[in-house]
Image: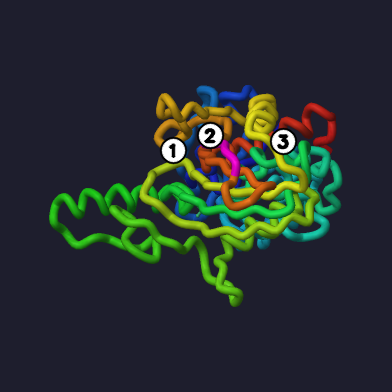
């Protein structure tokens, strides 16, 4: 398999290298691409060194089977035709094509088969916060249709990229050293703070991140569910967490939900309040599964359940999900 990674120097790009190596993905040849800032840098993959090429409008993608792209929506839109021209499958981590009717939006645990119908050769990887929520909600949807979702997110600095993670660490150092605090990657100081804004505001008062949760959840789950989200940046470094309240068509008992979640792929139940056991970003960072705990009845809704989840935003929320899509295509023999 000839594999390309576009945006390899970013947090997600670097995670692609780690995930592909760890999972023994069948990479025979690897091409790395980046902007003029990262072109010429070198990265090692399975003991061999590869140099980052400048992403250009040319024939570099001839012969590529799978291209993982994570360089922002603008770059994805600009280069999609070059990347897919010779038949490469583009698995795109940006928001560029997620809601396009002719681009499947895939979380393998929920809708892997959608990846087989890709008229433009593009498969979109959903937003991290949405991916982690649907992995947990799909097993409950199989028990009874979910009509409504309320969700409050607790999103780490990692969601804004490697430079934002570095800025959070720098802010803590600056505060301790009594220096002015650098604020460039977030709308406000994040250290010792929470910021109730992720991405830009829309005319309805929700942010783009919150509307992604509404729209992407419906597309992935093939559902008419309505999802009202409050997305918040918190000062954890890596791994996002979410409080989720759902209303199902018939009441679901806690034990029934817990059993369905325990049996679900990609989910680990960590729910033992008596021993203070529940998922936390410090523990879920670097892990593959989405962790779920605090599963209980919603006191405000007879058909409601509430739970808490946490998962690594760079892995399952981005690179791992994309690689799992590619693994599915390889498994069913549908790469070209
Ligand atoms: C964030 N969800 O956490 C975004 C990244 N896609 O900022």
Asked if labels 2 and 1 touch by Cβ distance under 8 angstroms, the answer is no
- The quadrant of the rendering that contains the N terminus is top right
Residue 233 picture location, percent across and down: 43, 55
Q: Nearer the viewer, residue 254 or 333?
A: 254
Tell me which secondary structure the magenta stretch mostly adopts: strand
Name the residue tied to disc 2.
293
At a point 79% along the width and 27% down the height, the residue shown is 331
| Disc 3 residue crowd, few under 14, some 14–19, many 20+, Cα 10 Å | many
Residue stretch rendered in magenta on the structure:
293-297
Tell me if residue 294 is in the magenta stretch. yes
Q: Mark 3 or mark 1: which comes first in sequence?
A: 3
Name the residue tied to disc 3.
139
Distance from Cα at disc 1 to Cα at disc 2: 13 Å
- The quadrant of the rendering that contains the C terminus is top right
Classify residue 193 as left or right of residue 306.
left
Residue 185 picture location, percent across and down: 39, 60
Name the residue tied to disc 1.
281
Q: Nearer the viewer, residue 237 or 277?
A: 277
Classify residue 168 as left or right of residue 27.
left
Residue 7 picture location, percent across and down: 55, 48
| Disc 1 residue crowd, few under 14, some 14–19, many 20+, Cα 10 Å | many
Q: Nearer the viewer, residue 153 or 40?
A: 153
């Amino acid at each position: 398999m000839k594999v390309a990674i576009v945006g390899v120097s970013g947090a997600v790009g670097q995670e692609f290298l780690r995930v592909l190596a760890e999972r023994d993905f069948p990479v025979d040849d690897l091409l790395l691409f980046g902007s003029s800032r990262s072109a010429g840098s070198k990265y090692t993959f399975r003991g061999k060194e590869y140099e980052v090429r400048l992403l250009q409008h040319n024939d570099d993608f001839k012969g590529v089977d799978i291209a993982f792209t994570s360089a922002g929506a603008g770059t994805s839109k600009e280069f999609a035709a070059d990347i897919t021209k010779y038949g490469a499958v583009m698995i795109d981590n940006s928001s560029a094509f997620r809601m396009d009717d002719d681009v499947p939006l895939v979380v393998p645990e929920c809708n892997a088969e959608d990846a087989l119908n890709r008229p433009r050769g593009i498969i979109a990887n959903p937003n991290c916060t949405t991916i982690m929520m649907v992995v947990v909600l799909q097993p409950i949807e199989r028990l009874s249709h979910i009509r409504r979702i309320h969700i409050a997110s607790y999103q780490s600095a990692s969601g804004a990229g490697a430079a934002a993670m570095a800025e959070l660490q720098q802010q803590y150092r600056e505060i301790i050293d009594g220096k002015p605090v650098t604020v460039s990657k977030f709308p406000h100081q994040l250290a010792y703070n929470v910021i109730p804004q992720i991405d830009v505001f829309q005319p309805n008062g929700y942010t783009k991140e919150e509307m992604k949760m509404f729209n992407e959840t419906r597309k992935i789950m093939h559902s008419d569910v309505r999802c009202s989200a409050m997305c918040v940046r918190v000062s954890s470094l890596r791994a996002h967490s979410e409080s989720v309240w759902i209303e199902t068509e018939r009441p679901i008992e806690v034990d029934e939900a817990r059993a369905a979640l325990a049996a679900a792929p990609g989910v680990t139940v960590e729910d033992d309040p008596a021993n203070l056991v529940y998922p936390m970003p410090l523990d879920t960072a670097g892990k593959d599964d989405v962790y779920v705990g605090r599963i209980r009845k919603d006191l405000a809704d007879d058909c409601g359940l509430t739970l808490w989840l946490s998962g690594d935003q760079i892995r399952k929320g981005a690179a791992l999900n994309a690689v799992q899509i590619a693994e599915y295509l390889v498994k069913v023999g549908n790469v070209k």
